[in-house]
Amino acid sequence: MKWLLAEDEADIRNLLAMMFQVWGYQPVAYENGQKVWDWLDQIERGTGDSIPDLVLMDIRMPGKRGNELANRMRTIEAFKETPIVLMTAYTLTEGERAQMMREDGVDRIISKPLPDFEQLRELLNKVHHEKKTTAAASAADVAEVTSAQTPETTVKPESNGSEPS
């Protein structure tokens, strides 16, 4: 599985990328929001790499902010079911957090300093599992509603040319 990482602080980016590898994930790391934006341009043109299984981005980076990137990702069909986690060293109000989650499609926001590695791994895996479970349940609900809305067809017996007397 591939995990996307966008973090402008080189030490944090390198450490997280290394931890992703230790945990068995292939990191795809970007050092600023503009590089992720450019990669999204490639995705939309069909020339980019495959979609990651999870996205972890800093909110405040040079170029585009993490929530702006999340918002754009949610407009791309291939990212609809991809868990997006933002991280920040800044204090956000509950209103700001709720707004990013509601308007930008963010699944979780975590604060820096980040939790210890095992807690972070558990948190990211939990978000990934929850998103995939929710997506599967939504797909099942859509299938159920679609089948319930399909009118039943009545099959009439074919006439053999003779009418009952």
Image: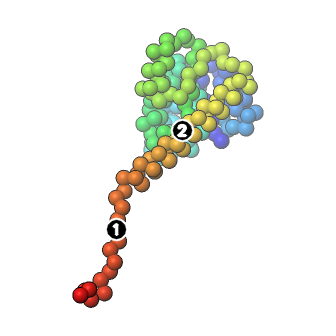
Rendered residue at 67%/38% (across/down): 26
Task: Locate residue 29 relative to residue 59 in the image: left or right.
Answer: right
Q: Which residue is mark 1?
A: 154
Say left or right for 134 vs 13: left
Residue 4 in sight: no
Closer-to-camera residue (163/165)? 165
- Give the position of the N terminus as an image quadrant: top right
Give the percent coordinates (x, y) of residue 33. 52, 26
Q: Callout 1: few (<14), some (14-19), or many (20+) C-alpha neighbours within 10 Å?
A: few
Q: Amino acid at mark 2?
A: Thr
Residue 89 position by quadrant: top right
Along the line of sight, the residue nearer the viewer: 85 or 51:
85
The single residue placed furthest to the right in the displayed view is 22
Q: Callout 2: 10 Å neighbours few (<14), some, many (20+)?
A: few
Q: Which residue is mark 2?
A: 134
Quadrant housing the C terminus: bottom left
Cα separation, mark 1 vs mark 2, equals: 36 Å
Contact check, label 1 and label 2, Cβ < 8 Å:
no
The reply to whether residue 9 is visible in this rendering is yes
Q: Which element carries disc 1, helix, strand or loop?
A: loop
Please count the marks in the image: 2
Q: Give percent across and percent down for residue 12.
A: 67, 21
Question: Which element type, helix, strand or loop, lies under badge 2?
Answer: helix
Residue 138, image x, y percentages: 49, 42
Amino acid type, callout 1: Thr
The residue lying at 36 percent from left, 52 percent from top is 149
Closer to viewer: mark 1 or mark 2:
1
Describe residue 123's horizontal placement relative to residue 144 as left or right: right
Foreground residue, 46 or 159? Answer: 159
Seen at 46% across and 16% down, the residue is 96
Residue 46 x %, y %: 48, 47
